[in-house]
Amino acid sequence: MRFDKFFEAPYPLILDGGLSNVLESFGCDLNHRLWTAQLLANSPETIIEAHLEYLKAGAQCIITSSYQASIPGLMDMGYSRDMAVKLILKSVLLAEAAVDDVMDSGIVNVKPLIAASIGPYGAYLADGSEYHGNYGVSDKVLRDFHEERIGILNSSNADILACETIPSIQEARILSDILYQVDKPAWVSFSCKDGQHVNDGSKIEDCVSIFRDHPTVFAVGLNCTSPLYISGLIQRIKASSGDKRIIVYPNSGEAYNAESKTWRGLSEPGHFVEMSKEWVKLGADIIGGCCRIGPGHIKSISSNFSKGKS
């Protein structure tokens, strides 16, 4: 099954960039176990403003603030189960509000898509575990963690389910099973430690091949991965993913310190537009950015690729 009908704009489809860096630029303190998800309850209007930054920059698809908004994570912070469900759904409502704003204002002519973020189990742990993927937990633990939230977001008005920053083949297999039950199209993007392996050491080819014939997963690819590795990884993914769309939204190449929840190092993608041109030539269909990639980057690639779209 193909889901091209969801995309009115020609490829490449332009995603947004990192939500956290925009929120931090607004003065938000994200040093919190729930990261950006804390703002769902405390400052929802700020999330709308962050989405608007990317929509005004040309993003054709925005990703919700639900990456770290899981049922157990929210309940650990004192929310009831009912309130946790409402906050997860609220992440989609806030994205819808931003989309409605740009449509009503006439800034864009084609309605942008909304992808509901589904972060990995490591995001719930909030200790940087998604950067190694070796959780040491059973398949049941992972299934119980993911299944309810995916069901909640599948019932929302989001256009796409975005399973992102997946660091292990174990988690990929669990997600594959769960995604057979959904009605919405989904993408699965992996976080890789080098040009050949996801963070747990599994080969990227083995991970994406799980979804080669999957009926609801329309795209596979990469996010929260250094831009230095993207070109080589695209070629490996393309050889193993059949006719799936390829999605890439790398980070800036900086290093994240999970203890202090800060980024260190120099930003590497100084020529983000040139890199994105190469990625498209190699087969990338959907392009954006992850951590530390901001509206300026998205505006640049949007402007570049819009020149070739009719």
Image (cartoon, rainbow, N blue to C red):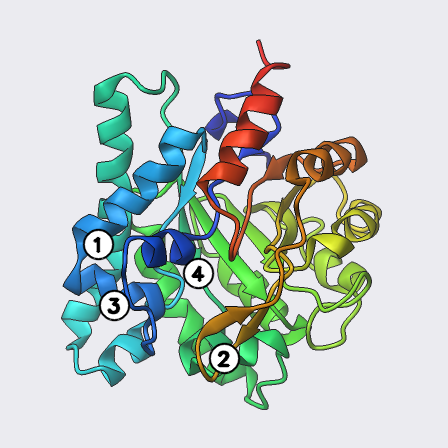
Write down the quadrant of residue 218 in the picture.
Answer: top right
- From mark 4 to mark 3, how far is it between C-alphas? 16 Å
The circle drawn on residue 118 is: 4
Residue 32 position (above or below residue 166):
below
**Labels 2 and 1: the sequence-earlier one:** 1
**Labels 4 and 1: the sequence-earlier one:** 1
**Amino acid type assigned to the residue bearing label 2 in the image:** Ala
Q: Secondary structure at mark 1?
A: helix
Q: Secondary structure at mark 4?
A: strand
The circle drawn on residue 123 is: none
Whether pointer 3 and pointer 1 mark residues with C-beta atoms closer than 8 Å, the reply is no
- From mark 2 to mark 1, how far is it between C-alphas? 26 Å
**Amino acid type assigned to the residue bearing label 1 in the image:** Lys
Residue designated by label 3: 38
- From mark 3 to mark 2, how far is it between C-alphas? 17 Å
Q: Secondary structure at mark 3?
A: helix
Q: Secondary structure at mark 2?
A: loop
**Amino acid type assigned to the residue bearing label 3 in the image:** Gln
Whether pointer 4 and pointer 3 mark residues with C-beta atoms closer than 8 Å, the reply is no
Residue 172 position (above or below residue 101):
below
Residue designated by label 2: 258
Residue 139 shown left or right of residue 147 in the figure = right
Residue designated by label 1: 90
Please tell me which residue is depicted at 28% across the width and 53% down the height of the picture.
26
Which label sits in the foreground, 3 or 2? 2
Please tell me which residue is depicted at 17% across the width and 58% down the height of the picture.
43
- From mark 3 to mark 1, how far is it between C-alphas? 12 Å
Which label sits in the foreground, 2 or 1? 2
Which label sits in the foreground, 4 or 2? 2
- Which residue is most to the bottom? 136
